[in-house]
Amino acid sequence: MGVFAETHEIPVWKLIKLWIAEGFVKKVYHKNLEDVAEENLRELVDRSLVLVGKHSSLGFIKTCKMHDLVRDMCLREAQYENFIHFKTRYDNDDLLENFNCLRRVVDFNKYGYSEIPKLMPLTRSVFFKYPHFFCFLSQSSFRLLRILDVCFTSFLYCSQSISELVHLKYLACPSFDGLVQSVCKLRNIQNLVIHDLNLSGLHMRTQSLPWEVVNMPQLRHIHTKKFSLFIPPPTSLIAERENHLQTLTGLEPSSCNDEVFLRIPNLKKLGILIVDSDTIRKCYCLDNLVHLTQLEKLKVEFSESYLLIFRRISEGWVDLSWLHIPHCDNFPPNLKKLTLCGTYLQWEDMNILKKLPNLEVLKLKHHAFHGLIWKLSDEDEDGFFQLKFLLLESLHLKQWEATSYHFPSLEHLVLTDCYSLEQIPFDFAEIQTLQLIELHKCMLSVLDLAEQIQEEQQSLGNDDLVIRVNYIRE
């Protein structure tokens, strides 16, 4: 945990991946390593050695941190036991004198280029923590290296030397041409985290990822940031191999087809991203999800610029949505979490989503739906019967009409940046499972309704409902 910056909360998903790659997590019969790692983290929390930062929508630990005093003590002991070494601007000589016995190196040098010695035979992990500077990886440096983490926009030289890291299990690096062929030779790689080199962040791009990488025998997770991935159709030879991929984010819509989905049947988490384009056309990327029978988490995001949105409005587009919502039978049967961002759907499309039988988390962000009124009729036989968490963020929604029948299992409701919303359904006072309502940047009338719901629940004997308020608009 010492490799993370002291002032930042630690993302649990990354911490667990690093633990597993290092071999810290011991296999338990009938449990996967991720579950065992989460149990280990919970034990540290119970002993007050680790503090919880944020919780996920389903109540799991999302981020964590350490108390300053505990962290300082652990780092001193770790360096004394030669468990980890922190390289800064001022201790290069110390590193060079002891590199033969270093197991883990964290480079905090932010003042120039970083160069690792040519031979570090026992090193298991190397982390470069600062961006915008050159880092040099020499040939034949780390025969036992399991983790190589290059922070964001650092430039990684001698990519061919990466192919020699046959024990590498976790690779985080910026995307650049020429890396793919080296990665294909890493037969033990389990986690691949790729960040775009675009410093401005204004325009996203799409990069091709060949099947030779997607279908590597041990690869379980592919995470991307600030760009989308295009996966070309697989060859017949590659298609015959068994695939173990569980996480894939940033997938370009044109790759959401039968040829791809049929060959990654074990996928549990999928992120679909369409980058800004001047081409306006309907997207049918969800129509083939039925092949992903194990999928539990799905995020669909459209990084469309406001200029293009205004252009569509000025040209008289009534339906601003680019995403086609297929029949509910086309969705994976085990889908538990759905996040939609910038999709501009019509509220009528919600009639399909509410039929998803196992949906527990629904997040609607940044104009995911377009329209002033969201109405769920009392005559509707279908509702979000398993939904526990609902987020409405940055929606131009004015009226919301629903009853407790439509959300009988709701536990956590979050409204963020919904300035136009006048009220929430008072009938939510009948939802016995409701535990928390969070209001951020909402109207005063919404807070008044939430307090009335709380009072009504208290009159029914439920004192568990909590209201959290950040900023209310008068």
Image (cartoon, rainbow, N blue to C red):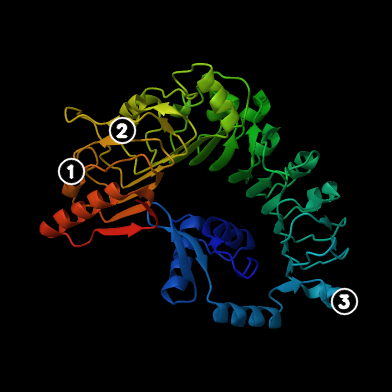
Q: Could you tell me the amino acid type at mark 2?
A: Lys
Point out residue 169 in the picture as x, y percentages from the top left corner.
67, 54
Q: Is residue 198 left or right of residue 303?
A: right
Point out residue 303 in the picture as x, y percentages from the top left corner.
57, 34
Which label sits in the foreground, 3 or 1?
1
- Look at the image and tell me whether residue 244 can be seen: no
Q: Label 1, on which residue?
A: 427
- Look at the image and tell me whether residue 110 can be seen: yes
Q: Residue furthest front?
A: 474
Q: How busy is the neighbourhood of tag 2: few (under 14 within 10 Å), some, or many (20 plus)?
A: many
Point out residue 444 in the picture as x, y percentages from the top left corner.
30, 50
* Image quadrant where residue 357 sits: top left
| Mark closer to the chain start, 3 or 1 | 3
Query: Is 221 rendered above or below residue 44?
Result: above
State how far apart marks 3 and 1 are (Cα).
Answer: 69 Å
Q: Could you tell me the amino acid type at mark 3?
A: Asp
Residue at x 35%, y 28% (from the top left corner): 347
Foreground residue, 113 or 331? 113
Q: Which mark is on residue 93?
A: 3
Q: Label 2, on which residue?
A: 354
Point out residue 143 in the picture as x, y percentages from the top left corner.
79, 60
Residue at x 68%, y 50% (from the top left corner): 188
Q: How busy is the neighbourhood of tag 3: few (under 14 within 10 Å), some, or many (20 plus)?
A: few
